[in-house]
Amino acid sequence: LRMGTIKGQGLMWKDFAIGHVEAYLALKDSQERLGFLRANAAEGLPADDERADIVLDLYYYTLQFGIDKAFTADKLSVLFSIMKTTFLESMREFLPAKASFNFFRDLLLKHSVQRPP
């Protein structure tokens, strides 16, 4: 499985395709899930293993939040991509906290209404 972009749907399936969501949910424990994320969400991870582990924790707990709130696969995909996109953009542009929050808020608002593509 390779993560990619489906155009025209915003962030849905951009970083976490339906097959990835299903495979991730089938994993039994946090170590398996962190390994899955390391293998399938490595784009943009820091080269330093300690920093990469911190980012993987962000991704893991983002998905765990969605799972705990009973998000559907499409909503888990969007949640993951919102957090990943916000993180990568904030690091790439060295955004201050307020600008990073505004970027996050804009993505969240853009994806808050469910409508047909």
Image (cartoon, rainbow, N blue to C red):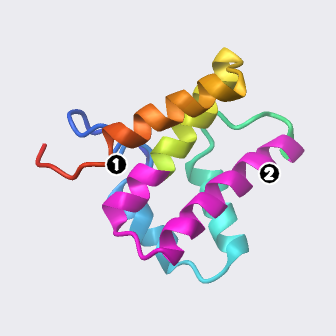
Q: Quick one: SS at disc 1?
A: loop
Q: Are there few (<14), some (14-19), or many (20+) residues within 10 Å of tag 2? A: some
Residue 65 locus on image (x, y percent): 56, 67
Q: Position of residue 91 (x, y in %)?
A: 69, 25
User: Measured from the top left, where is residue 94 in percent x and y?
Assistant: 71, 18
- Residue assigned mark 1: 13
Q: Which badge, 2 or 1, comes first in the chain's sequence?
A: 1
34 or 2: nearer the viewer: 34
Q: Tag 2's secondary structure? A: helix
Magenta span: predominant SS is: helix
- Residue 19 lies in magenta, yes or no? no
Q: Residue furthest front?
A: 98
Q: Which residue is mark 2?
A: 53
| Tag 2 near tag 1, CB within 8 Å | no
State which quarter of the image contains the C terminus: top left
The kind of residue on which mark 1 rests is: Trp
**In which quadrant of the rendered image does the N terminus lie?**
bottom left
Residue 41 appears anywhere in the view: yes
Few, some or many C-alpha atoms within 10 Å of disc 1 (few <14, some 14-19, many ≥20)? many
Tally the numbered discs. Answer: 2
Residue sitting at 48 percent across and 37 percent down? 105
Q: Quadrant of residue 19?
A: bottom left
Q: Is residue 62 above or below residue 112?
A: below
* Region rendered in magenta: 50-79
Q: Residue at x 48, y 43 (%)?
A: 82
Quadrant location of residue 20?
Answer: bottom left
- Asked if 108 appears above or below 79 in the picture, the reply is above
Reply above or below: 109 against 69: above
